[in-house]
């Protein structure tokens, strides 16, 4: 194994991405990779895969690898020339460089390629690069496989929810009596009648130390993507909300983006941003609540009630006033007992991914500087 002194440009020549608006994108399978990742698709590729993309504006220094052909967005820099290096290795290598620290614009964070091309590095030979990439890819492949399994489990729960509570094909529906379009024992009510919102919050200056902080940027559709640990003294002022087991958190900002998650088993020092509405089931199944407040119809309700042109947001009152359909107690209990094992398995896979991610992140810098021979 040999390592050579060099500069970043020796492993990748970066170039600014290509502008394209959502309106200009046409249905296709080509990922459009922005500084926040592949969020949309187009029918034309600008770059042949495999390739590497890093965030240039917004989420500075974020790193994405694409095996397939792709369109690097204008908010990114992409690897125009990998100089004969292994593409996956380059992507992993860039993750260790903390490129976000090279922000060149205070008002609008920007990464200038000319400021990083000359950064000193140590580069291993191609065979070593391929072995390192193979080791780290094994972790990422397992993580991605678990994510797919998690998505399938949630899909199964949602399909059952729709079957029972939208199409009314619940156990015993063949003999059920209906009145005013609803099965006997069912009723419509406001969410506030069966749930509480923002039930508990820490008082200012009284949060745990250290604190595991979850902000609205750390939550995507159906999952918490990251947690940031702070000392109580350094934690953001918005770190106040408390979530209990099986509570649902919903970002108040831009509800059309669907940033929500079920908090299955929060840790004692988990604290959530005040930008969330935390929904706690009081008299009905919390899993039924989660699936109810994340349906397409509920998302439309929130989107229609969001106020503010440049920063549309809803309030906890909007959740409280939302009308939901509540089935009979017996059917609610049966549904909860049916889907609880699904969500428990989903939780176990998520915890497994946390362990895999921690192991990969521990290995990453040690493999990249040669401390661990391969």
Image (cartoon, helix red, strand yellow):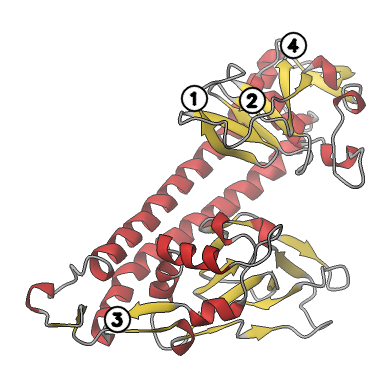
Under circle 1, the secondary element is loop
Mark 4 vs mark 2: which is more N-terminal?
A: 4
Give the mark, 3 or 2, whose residue is nearer the N terminus.
Answer: 2
- For the residues bearing labels 3 and 1, Cβ distance under 8 angstroms: no
Label 3, residues with CA under 10 Å away: few <14, some 14-19, many ≥20: some
Q: Whole-Å distance between the Cαs marked 4 and 2?
A: 13 Å
Measured in 3D between alpha carbons, the distance from the residue under mark 1 to the one under mark 4, in whole angstroms, is 28 Å
> Which of marks 4 and 1 precedes in the sequence?
1
Left/right of residue 161 with respect to residue 74 in the rendered view: left
Is the C-beta separation of discs 1 and 2 under 8 Å?
A: no
- What is the x, y in percent for residue 312? 65, 62
Task: Check disc 2 and report the residue beneath it.
Answer: 88
User: Where is mark 4, residue-wise?
Assistant: 83
> What is the distance, in whole Å, between disc 1 and disc 2 at their CAs?
24 Å
Q: Secondary structure at mark 2?
A: helix
178 shown above or below 128: below
Q: Which residue is mark 1?
A: 43
Q: Which residue is mark 3?
A: 333
């Amino acid at each position: 194994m040999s390592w050579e002194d060099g500069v970043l440009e020796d492993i990748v020549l970066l170039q600014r991405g290509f502008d394209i608006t959502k309106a200009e994108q046409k249905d296709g399978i080509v990922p459009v990779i922005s500084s926040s990742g592949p969020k949309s698709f187009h029918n034309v590729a600008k770059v042949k895969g495999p390739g590497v993309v890093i965030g240039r504006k917004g989420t500075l220094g974020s790193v994405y690898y694409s095996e397939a052909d792709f369109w690097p967005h204008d908010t990114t820099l992409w690897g125009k020339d990998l100089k004969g290096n292994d593409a996956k290795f380059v992507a992993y290598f860039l993750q260790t460089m903390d490129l976000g620290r090279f922000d060149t614009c205070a008002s609008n964070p920007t990464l200038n390629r000319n400021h990083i091309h000359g950064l000193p590095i140590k580069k291993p030979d191609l065979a070593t690069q391929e072995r390192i990439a193979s080791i780290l890819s094994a972790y990422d492949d397992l993580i991605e496989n678990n994510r797919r399994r998690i998505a399938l489990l949630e899909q199964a729960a949602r399909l059952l929810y729709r079957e029972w509570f939208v199409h009314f094909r619940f156990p015993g529906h063949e003999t059920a009596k209906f009145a005013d379009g609803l099965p006997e024992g069912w009723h419509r009510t406001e969410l506030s009648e069966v749930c509480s919102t923002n039930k508990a919050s820490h008082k200012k200056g009284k949060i745990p130390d250290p604190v595991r902080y979850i902000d609205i940027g750390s939550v995507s559709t159906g999952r918490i993507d990251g947690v940031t640990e702070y000392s109580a003294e350094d934690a953001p002022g918005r770190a106040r909300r408390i979530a209990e087991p099986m509570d649902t958190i919903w970002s108040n900002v831009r509800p059309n983006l669907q940033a929500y998650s079920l908090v299955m088993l929060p840790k004692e020092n988990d604290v959530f941003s005040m930008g969330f509405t935390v929904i706690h089931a009081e008299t009905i199944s919390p899993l039924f609540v989660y699936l109810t407040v994340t349906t397409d119809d509920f998302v439309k309700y929130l989107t229609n009630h969001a106020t503010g042109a440049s920063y549309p947001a809803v309030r906890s009152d909007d959740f409280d006033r939302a009308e939901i359909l509540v089935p009979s107690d017996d059917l609610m209990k049966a549904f909860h007992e049916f889907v609880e094992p699904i969500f428990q398995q989903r939780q176990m896979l998520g915890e497994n991914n946390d362990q895999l991610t921690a192991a990969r992140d521990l290995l990453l810098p040690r493999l990249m500087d040669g401390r661990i021979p391969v």
